Image (cartoon, rainbow, N blue to C red):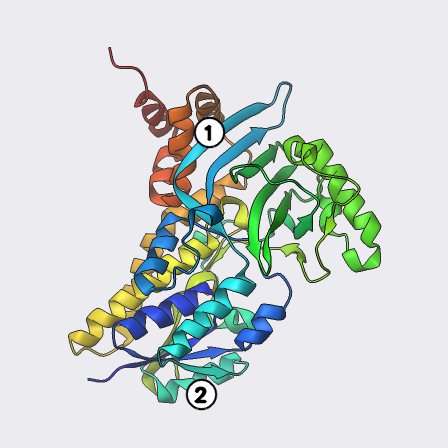
Amino acid sequence: MTTTIGIVGAGIAGLHLALYLQKHGIGVTLYSDRAAEELSSGKLPSSVALMGATLGRDGELGTNHWERPELGTFAVDIRVAGDPPLVLHGALTQPFLFIDMRVYLPTLMKDFTSRGGKLVVARCTAADVGRLAAGHDLVAVTTGRDGLTSMFPRVAERSPYEQPQRRLLAGLFRGVRFPDPFVMKFNIVPGQGEVFENQFLTHGGHVTCLLIEAVPGGVLEALTHLRYEADPCAFNASVLAALKEHAPDTYARADPATFALTSPRDTLSGAIVPTVRRGWAPLPGGRFAMAVGDTHITHDPLTGQGANAASRAAWLLGRLLVERTRAGGRVDEPFCVDAEQRLWEDARATTEWSNAFLQPPPAHAIGLLVAGAQNPAIANAFVSNFNDPNRQWQVLSSPDATAAFIAGFAPAG
C-alpha cells in the first residue's frame, strides 16, 4: 500500500516529520506559507534552545549542520533575586544550541528538497486543509497560522489557564560581552517574572539574545509593551535598565555606549495561553487531520520545551505512520485516536511541568535550588534534566520526590 502524507507548516515539527517520513520511504508533501528565502529574511520568530535529544534527532536525520563544540552552550546559571540572591551554576551533560529559526528552518527546508522532497509554497486555511485531504491519506497540521488551531478544540481538563501567565519580550542585542564559555543565564524575580540571556547563533554569527517573561501587572510588564520603532533609544535604555535591576551579571558585561537591538526585525513581543487541543479532526472523504507540535500543545517558553516537544512529537507520529504503512493498515479514525493518546502521554510531563512553573515555586522546588547552590552535582543534574522533561517532572512533582532526588547525592556512610 502506498501512503502519502501532507504536512501543513514548515516549523520544526513539520520539517522533522517531513524529513523522518522521507528517510523511511513515505511519500510526503510539505506545505509552507513562506519559501526558505522569505523565512530567512523575516522577523525573529522565537528564541528557542535545541536541547541534546533534539540535536540527536538532527544527527539521525543528517541535518546536524551545527554540531561543533564552539557553537554549544554547556552550562546554565540560575539566580533567584533576594537578599542575598540564591545562585546556582550547573554544567549540562549535553549542550544546548541556541539558534535562530531563520537560519535553522530554511536550511532544513533545503535539505528536504535537495533529497527529492516536494515543497509547495502556499497559505493554507482550515478549508484548504479539507481540500488537501483528497490527495493524502493524512494531513498533519503543524502550524497555527491562518486560524488553523480552530480545527482542534481546546481540551479544558488539560488546559488550566484561560489567560496568558506571562507577557513576553525577546530581542537580539549587540554590546554585551559573551561569557567564556557560553552560559545560559536564568534570572528569577519572584512575583515579577524572569530574564534570560543566551548566546544566539544568527546570520553572521553569535549575538546576545534576551528574553523577558513578565508576570502581568508586575514591574517587568511595561517592557513587553515597548515598540522599538516608536523610540529606539528609549527601547534600548529601558532594556538596559531592566538588566541592571534584574540581571546584574548580564549588565556587568554590557557596554552602555554600544548596547542596542541589532535590527528592527530582531525583536518580538506578545503573550501565549498554554493550551492542549484535540489531536485530530475529521476531513472530507473519510480522511483525517492530526495536530502536531504547537498546534496540538502550546507551551509557554519559560522552561524552553516548545521546539523540543514539537520535534519529539513529530518523531513519534512519524514512527507510528511508518509502522502502520509497513503493516498495510489504513490511516483511519482508530489510528488517529490511538496516536493522539500516545502523543499526549509522551507530552504530559512536559506540559504539566511547564504549566506548574508559571506559578510561584513551591517550597520543595526552592529547596532543590538551595541544595543545588550548595552541591554542584545536584545543580548539574537539575539543569541537565531540562533535556529530560519526564525525569524533571518526576523530580519536581511532589515534595517526597524532590527530597528523594536530593538525598541521592548525600555522601555514602
Residue where numbered disc 2 is placed: 131
Quarter occupied by residue 399: top left
Local packing at callout 1 (Cα closer than 10 Å; few below 14, some 14-19, many 20+) is: some
| As drawn, 19 above or below 385 | below
Q: Position of residue 69 (x, y in %)?
A: 43, 46
Q: Nearer the viewer, residue 354 or 45?
A: 45
Three-letter residue code for mark 2: Arg
The secondary structure type at the circle numbered 2 is helix
Residue 142 at least partly seen: no
Residue where numbered disc 1 is placed: 365
Q: Residue at x 44, y 84 (%)?
A: 130
Q: Position of residue 260 (x, y in %)?
A: 74, 49
Label 2 vs 1, first from the N-terminus: 2
Q: Nearer the viewer, residue 151 or 259?
A: 259
Three-letter residue code for mark 1: Ala
Q: Quadrant of the N terminus?
A: bottom left
| As drawn, 203 above or below 165 | below
Local packing at callout 2 (Cα closer than 10 Å; few below 14, some 14-19, many 20+) is: some
| As drawn, 409 above or below 53 | above
Q: CA distance from mark 2 to mark 1?
A: 49 Å
Q: Position of residue 402 (x, y in %)?
A: 37, 28
